[in-house]
Amino acid sequence: MIKKGIILAGGTGTRLSPLTKAVNKQLLPLYDKPLIFYPLSILMLAGIKNILIIVNDGQEENFSNILGNGKRYGINIKYKIQKKPRGIAEAFILGKNFIKKDSVSLILGDNFFYGQSLTAKLLKSKNQNKGATIFLKSVNNPENFGVAVIKNSKISTIVEKPKKFISKQAITGLYFFDNEVIKIAKKIKPSKRNELEITDILKVYQKNKNLKYEEIGRGAIWSDAGKIEDLTNLSNFVHSIEKVQNIKIACIDEIALNQKWIDKKQLQSNIKYYGNCEYSQYLKNL
């Protein structure tokens, strides 16, 4: 069972410049909440309470101002500085002392997931004891992502940003790994762009026949918020869903309450912390 999660929230965010010249992109607003709330909510929905957030040098205080050590949400949050982005796979090297001998989930800090069936898939993957699980989503522009080819209900091939079409199944920024991922991450070599590629780790698991997958169906949404257009579209989507359904997407306080990690007294304290805002009013109505 996976009890630990990592959010990779480093990177330079150049595609969102000049917004990211002063602040990390995961602290930018996605509608009414900081972007970091969305990947954090996914780990919380999976029942993961011990979380490491990997951040840029100089940004730890900004993240801590919003999330603290996680006590407000009944979880444990630690921070690790990434001095220079060297690829997604570096997260397991930076986080080895946090992971220790446990299995771990990794989610990219700019990824957005939403769907009614998603929680069940998260819990299923969380309960794995061996191997790795990735989440796939059919896309129209697979050349922009790592892609998996499925044959006979198994992953036969993994290619990073294929130049020729091989599959529409993009590998999303959500992964579940057993403890072997640390050893594998230490052994892989930097790619041509001088990064430790997550696809190279996945290829090792695939070669060892220890790589499973879950498909995010048509009723679910996945996107990264790496560009202004993505951030705007996702903000409009969240706004529409929240207004029509009268719910809050990625409301980490509500998730914590539903998980029974906090009680009503703590929720009231959180409301006081946020102050007089729409988010606080929603929490009052709970």
Image (tube, rainbow, N blue to C red):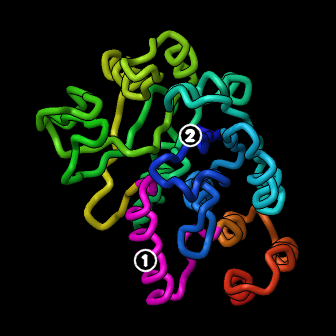
- Which disc is residue 11 wearing? 2
**Coordinates of residue 249 in the picture (x, y in percent):** 54, 72
Magenta segment includes 24: no
Q: Could you say which is closer to the camera, residue 279 or residue 116? A: 279
Residue 118 locus on image (x, y percent)? 42, 59
Q: Which residues are magenta?
A: 224-251
Q: Quadrant of residue 42?
A: bottom right
Is label 2 in a helix, a strand or a loop? loop
Instruction: State the residue in front, 34 or 256.
Output: 34
Locate residue 269, reporting x and y percent: 87, 75
Amino acid type, label 1: Asn
Q: Which mark is residue 138?
A: none
What residue is shown at x 39% (from left), y 18% (from top)?
191
Residue 49 is left or right of residue 125, and the answer is: right
**From the viewer's perspective, is residue 107 above or below residue 68?**
above
Residue underneath mark 1: 236
In this view, the residue farthest toward the left is: 165
